[in-house]
Image: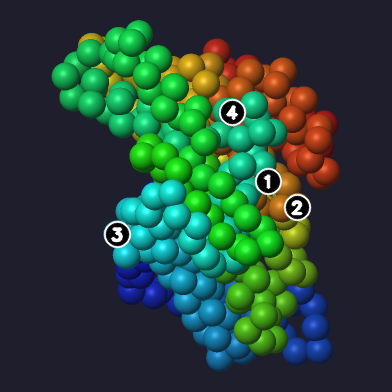
Amino acid sequence: MRLSSCCFAALLLFTVSNTNAYPKSKKTTHLYTSHYENVLGTSMELKIYATSSQEAANAETAALNEISRMSKILSAYDANSEFSKWLKTSQQSEHVSPELFEVLSLFDQWKTRTDGALDASAEVITKLWKQAAAKQRVPTTEELSDAVAETQQTHWVLDASKQTATHLSHAPLVLNSFAKSYIIKHAADAALASGNVNAIVVNIGGDLVIFGDLKETVQISNPKNDAENETPIDQLIVSNKAVATSGNYRRGELINGHWYSHIVDPRTGIPADNIISATVVAPNATDAGALATAFNVMSPAESIKLASTIAGAEYLIITRDGERIASKG
C-alpha cells in the first residue's frame, strides 16, 4: 500500500433499487456505486445505500474529502504532508495532529504486540533489498545486520499530555501496514455522518469496511492465481466489520531467478516467504490491517496466539505450500 496524494479519476455513478436485497426503511433504499483510480496508489470502490442521489452524493464527497485530508497528514510520499514535514525535524518536541499522534501511538503498540514484526522503519530493510536487487545480488550478512540494528533504534518519543512527538532517528519511516485500513475507516465514518445514509462499503485496493444496515459478500482472491478475477479461494458474508488482506504474491524483487517478497521481517532483515496471503476480518479496521500484515511475517503459531488476543478477529492464512490455516469463525 502506498500512501500518496489522492488523485481522483472520473466518477462512474449508477443506482440499483431492490427492497429485498437492501436495507428496508420507510423510503425505498437505493445502491449508489462509484469507482475511482489513483486513490492511495490503487483503485477504490464506494457503495452507498441511501434514499436519494443527493444523500449519496453528500456521503461520497465526505468520504473523498476525508481520504484526501488523511493522506495529507500520513503520507510519506508527499513532501508536504504533516508526517513528511515532521520527519525533517530532529530531537525537537513537535505538536502534531490527533491523527498523526494516534497512528504513531498505534505503531508503538503493534511493534510491542508483534514482538517487532511490525515496524515503521522496515523501510530501511526494504530499501536495502531494492538496492541489492538492482545489482542482482542479495544483501551481505553485514548489510542485513546493520539494517536490522537501524530498525531497532527508538525512532520517536510521544507525550500524550501535550500531544507532541519527538523525532529521534535518521531511519526512513513509512506508515504502511495498517494506515490504509485506518484511513478507510475514517472515510466510512465521514460518509455515514454526512446525512441520511443507511450503509456504506469503502473498498480501497481490496481492503474494506462495511458499516451500517447490510451484509456484504467479500471474495478472497487465490494468491496462486495469476489474475485477480479468477475463481476466489473463499468468500465471506460480512456486516459492520473491516476486512484486510496482505500477501507477498504480487510484489517483490527477482534476484538471479529467485523471488523475494516485498514484505520483510524487521527482526531479521529477511523477506517473509512462508506465508503468501493473510486475510483478517475484525470489528476494528486498524486491527484487521495490522494483523493481516503481521501474519505474513510471523509464524502461524505466533499469528494464532496474537489473534486470540483480539476480540472478534477471524483469519485465513495461506502458506507457501498451499496449507489453509483458518480460525473457527
Kindly identify which numbered label has been placed on residue 79.
3
Q: Which residue is mark 1?
A: 287
Q: CA distance from mark 3 to mark 1?
A: 28 Å
Of residues 121 and 155, which is closer to you in this image? Answer: 155
Q: Which residue is mark 4?
A: 116
Whether tag 2 and tag 1 are in contact, CB under 8 A, the answer is yes
Which sits earlier in the primary sequence, circle 3 or circle 4?
3
Tell me the element at label 4: loop
Q: CA distance from mark 4 to mark 2?
A: 24 Å
Q: Amino acid at mark 1?
A: Asp
Residue 270 in the figure: left or right of residue 220: left
| Residue 49 x/y as whole percent | 65, 76
Residue 326 in the figure: left or right of residue 83: right
Tell me the element at label 1: helix
Which sits earlier in the primary sequence, circle 3 or circle 2?
3
Q: Which residue is mark 2?
A: 283
| Residue 177 x/y as whole percent | 52, 42
The answer to whether residue 31 is seen in the rendering is no
Quadrant position of residue 303: top right
Q: Amino acid at mark 3?
A: Ala
Q: Amino acid at mark 2?
A: Pro
Q: What's the residue at 27%, 21% (across, down)?
A: 254
Between label 2 and label 1, give the one nearer the viewer. 1
Whether tag 3 and tag 2 are in contact, CB under 8 A, the answer is no
Q: What's the residue at 31%, 31% (across, down)?
A: 127
